[in-house]
Amino acid sequence: MTTSTAMFAVEQGDIGVVGLAASGILVAVAVAISLWRQLGLERSLLWASLRALVQLLAVGWVLQFVVDPDDPLIFSMLWIVAMVSFAAHTTARRAADVPRVLPLSLIAYTASAIVVLGVLFGFGIYDLEGRTLVPLAGMVIGNSLAATVLVSRQLLIAATEQREVIEGRLALGLSATEAFRPHLRQALRTALVPQIESTKAVGIVFLPGAMVGLILAGVDPADAVRVQVSVMYLVLGSVATTTAVMSLGISRELFTPAQQLRRPARRSND
Amino acid sequence: MSSADAFELIGVDAGPVAGDPILRSIDLVVPANGVTVLAGPSGAGKSTLLRLLNRLDDPVAGEVRWRGRALTDWAPTELRRQVAMVFQRAPLFPGTVFDNLRVAVADIDDSQAGHVLEHVGLNADLLDREATTLSGGEAQRMCVARALLTDPAVLLADEPTAALDGSARTTVEDLGRMLADSGVAVIWVSHDTDQLRRLADHVIVLADGAVRAVGHLDDLDASNDRIVRQSVGAP
């Protein structure tokens, strides 16, 4: 850390209140650009920045209690239950037409959390404590959210727009699973490929936030890299698990036990 | 094929919207020999009825039977391999014609695939063509070939020529006739009265969700019912 920036910084990466306020200059830059180019985004920029600050302050305050080594893990578990519920609710809202989307996404996020956290803690990669459990679960669930919404919508679109092709396969005596497999595969690829691409580009095109945060907080870059790599693998694993569970669940909901493709409530038919 | 192979509909209500069925209280025997044409005005319930026969849809009330067994007692996949179906718009799967045929029979070889294409009047050279490059008539005949690979006893055809031009329509019609003559019962939905008169061994006229008439063309030509006469193009 150079002398010129040291006035805002103390040891262990604490930028202090003054530092935080000064970083707000960058929001002012964005607002100035919006004004200059007449983008009309000033209010949105300010609102988003303020909202992020308040949300993170609130989370940080609550996290103090959850991650305290003296607190029992049950508080961390409750925190994870809340995160899973919130993610499932968000998925249900953003993919509202998907049948039984709320219970399915609850199952998907829970399964993903169990698998991924099971590996991370089961193999002793991280010590099981509130300080690690809550942030890692947050990474699992938060990073899976967009992909889960995407895969849910893709499957519903396939079932609607590719109805003739799917029924064409059913009419040949294929099971629902076989008839829908190409569409399931395509939806999963659509959800996973961006994740794979960003994983490939990491370190070359951009430095990931967790690593930057650790280095800024004074952690040895080699240690930061190890943590970051494990986090990236966590993200890949959790996105794959959540979308796989979600898409299998949705596939089952789209068909009846008699291997018929369900249809939306209204449909013109001769 | 004997009359025991016919489909029986007993007290059937059917349609996609619960509480507002298209077909109401249908009691009907659908012959499964030769070509049976389902006729009637738009919205009469012809396609709705056809889709019940291979359980792409189930009735909301009543029962459908085939060969003396309720359709619900058949495994749907087995039923659909015996009661095959082609659609108005030929559903093409990704890949070549050969890839499309393999969806029906995964382990089909080149000579079997070529043979079934020739059976529907297509050249075996088409096997390597991308299915999406086929003409409308070729695509529909390829779909019939694909459906025949499961060795069905019945072929359901939901307005299979409605999207085709004149000559393609004739070739698909001829194919339907040829299949019926070779022992595959054909149940064919049509709006086209000329086609009906060329093809039908039996006619079922539906109107407004009910059966209006059943019989041979000669019987229906003699009907006093204006809708029946219009539906069969009576002279």
Image (cartoon, grey):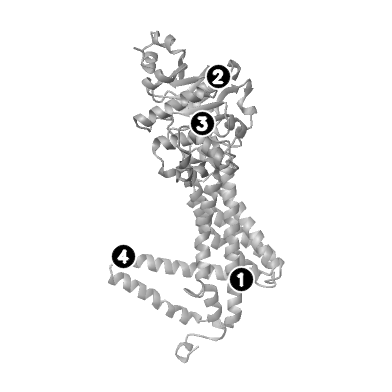
In the image, what residue occupies the spot 56% across and 71% down? Answer: A60
Check disc 1: other Cα within 10 Å, few if <14, some if 14-19, many if 20+. Answer: some
Q: Amino acid at mark 4?
A: Gly
Q: From the viewer's perspective, is the residue at label 1 or at label 4 nearer?
A: 1
Looking at the rendered image, the disc whose residue lies closer to the viewer, 3 or 1, is 3
Q: Are marks 3 and 1 in contact (CB under 8 Å)?
A: no
As drawn, the label of residue A132 is none
Front residue of A68/A165: it is A165
Give the CA separation, mark 3 to mark 4: 57 Å
Same chain, labels 3 and 1: no
How crowded is the residue under tag 4: few (<14 C-alpha within 10 Å), some, or many (20+)? few
Q: How far separated are the C-alphas under marks 1 and 4?
A: 40 Å
Report the mark closest to the observer, 4 or 2.
Answer: 2
Residue underneath mark 4: A40
Can residue B78 be seen? yes
Label 2 sits on residue = B11
Residue designated by label 3: B85
**Subunit bearing disc 1:** A
Instruction: Please say if B63 is above or below A42.
Output: above
Is label 4 on the same chain as label 2? no
Q: Chain of mark 4?
A: A
Q: Which residue is mark 1?
A: A230
Would you say the residues marked 1 and 2 are in contact, meaning their CB atoms lie under 8 Å apart? no
